[in-house]
């Protein structure tokens, strides 16, 4: 999965309800651009370069998969939606909201529409002071100086007053705090690994990913299912049991919860489809000997996708040994999962239909899935 770019965004407002304008902008940035990891304190500052009402200013740290130019375009759209009207004479003016990219990691961008780092940031205390709250050690890629040093050297003598009301981070509306262990499950190609990875990154969770890529029997199974089914399922069971047992027993004091892209019970679901009756009978006995000792997820999320969409996803990710998976095999897996989930009383189950959603590419779809999980 691609790594997001870290942006530092400066926000300001000096018209109407200034604090509300900032909060609306923060909410829109989270909704349309990416995950917000930090928000500075809000400061009241005098208008810079013109006479007007005092500004409220802050900075935030943003992680986004969007390119810098697209981030700029979206920020301008947010400004417009909040009532900002830009004049063509480029003079200083009062505004409901002002949104600027200060940093885009260590990138230097110089186009007609976008200059990063912001060319005036080092001269403006109303940018540097809130930026120092969230990025004091970040170095300016041109000046090779940390933000804290730029603030010390800034000749702007404006007096800024901290506001004792804090902006809310909209990511907090997605509350995972009631769970210690969440399993994201789904059929082949449903997107469970992508979703588990995104959640772990955005919400500080320990990530457990199935080690299917290391299984030497998987390609052989797709070539000769009858011959390699039992060997494959036994190797998966042993590996899943060991991995889950080890990872769940190792506490990580710096993570808030655990999220995995599988649950051990998938071994039973797949083996029931792939094994003959005698093999499955033996396998089931072995499985339950292990299963009783494994911690169960407190929340079990099943990502349902129809067969047509699954096949498109499988083709798109391009694993050679998966390209000839039959529709009826995928349908049997879906049925196996749904039959299993209907009988579960040990943990909370949420079945989410994502057949018409692309939560990897579309942020709105990702936020919709989060809301479904946390509802």
Image (spheres, helix red, strand yellow):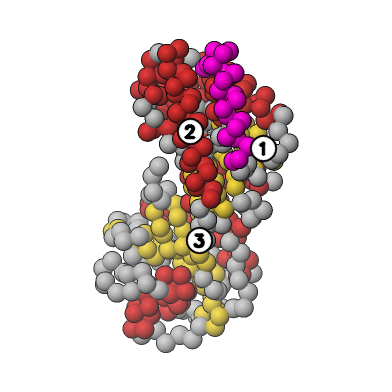
Residue 238, which numbered label? 2
Residue under circle 1? 350
Q: Marks 2/1: CA distance?
A: 27 Å
**Residue 115 at x, y percent in the picture:** 33, 61
With respect to residue 52, does 256 lie above or below?
above
Can the viewer see residue 374? yes
Can the viewer see residue 33? no
Observer-nearest residue: 298 or 32?
A: 298
Main secondary structure type of the part rendered in magenta? helix
Q: Marks 2/3: CA distance?
A: 29 Å
Q: Earlier in the sequence, mark 1 or mark 3?
A: 3
With respect to residue 196, does 325 lie above or below?
above
279 falls in the magenta region: yes
Residue under circle 3? 254
Segment colored magenta: 273-294
Q: Quadrant of residue 110?
A: bottom left
311 falls in the magenta region: no
Please tell me how crowded label 2 is: few (under 14), some (14-19), or many (20+) other residues with Cα within 10 Å. some
Residue under the image location 42 percent in, 17 percent down = 228
Residue under the image location 61 percent in, 30 percent down = 288
Q: Nearer the viewer, mark 1 or mark 3?
A: 3
């Amino acid at each position: 999965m691609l790594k997001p770019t870290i942006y530092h965004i400066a926000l300001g407002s000096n018209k109407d309800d200034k604090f509300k304008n900032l909060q609306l902008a923060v909410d829109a940035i989270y909704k349309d651009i990416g995950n917000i990891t930090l928000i500075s304190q809000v400061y009241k500052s005098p208008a810079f370069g013109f006479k007007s009402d005092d500004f409220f200013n802050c900075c935030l740290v943003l992680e986004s998969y969007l390119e810098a130019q697209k981030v700029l375009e979206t920020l301008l759209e947010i400004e417009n939606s909040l009532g900002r009207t830009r004049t063509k004479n480029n003079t200083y003016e009062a505004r409901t909201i002002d949104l600027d990219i200060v940093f885009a990691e260590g990138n230097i961008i110089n186009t007609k529409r976008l200059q990063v780092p912001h060319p005036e940031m080092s001269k403006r205390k109303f940018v540097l002071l809130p930026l120092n709250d969230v990025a004091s050690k970040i170095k300016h890629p041109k000046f090779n100086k940390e933000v804290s040093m730029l603030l010390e050297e800034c000749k702007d003598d404006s007096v800024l007053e901290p506001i004792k009301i804090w902006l809310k981070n909209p990511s907090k509306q997605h509350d995972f705090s009631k769970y210690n262990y969440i399993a994201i499950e789904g059929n082949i190609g449903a997107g469970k690994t992508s979703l588990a990875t995104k959640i772990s990154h955005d919400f500080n969770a320990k990530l457990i990913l199935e080690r299917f890529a290391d299984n030497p029997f998987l390609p052989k199974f797709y070539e000769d299912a009858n011959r390699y089914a039992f060997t494959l399922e036994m190797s998966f069971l042993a590996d899943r049991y060991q991995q889950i047992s080890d990872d769940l027993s190792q506490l990580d004091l710096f993570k808030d919860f655990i999220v995995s892209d599988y649950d051990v019970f998938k071994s039973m679901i797949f083996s029931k489809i792939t094994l003959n009756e005698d093999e499955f009978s033996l396998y089931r006995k072995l499985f339950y000997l292990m299963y009783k000792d494994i911690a169960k997820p407190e929340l079990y999320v099943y990502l349902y996708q129809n067969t047509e969409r699954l096949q498109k996803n499988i083709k798109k990710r391009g694993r050679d040994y998966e390209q000839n998976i039959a529709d009826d095999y995928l349908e049997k897996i879906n049925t196996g999962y749904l039959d299993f989930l209907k009988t579960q009383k040990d943990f909370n189950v949420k079945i989410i239909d994502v057949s018409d959603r692309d939560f990897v590419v579309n942020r709105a779809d990702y936020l919709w899935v989060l809301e479904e999980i946390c509802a």
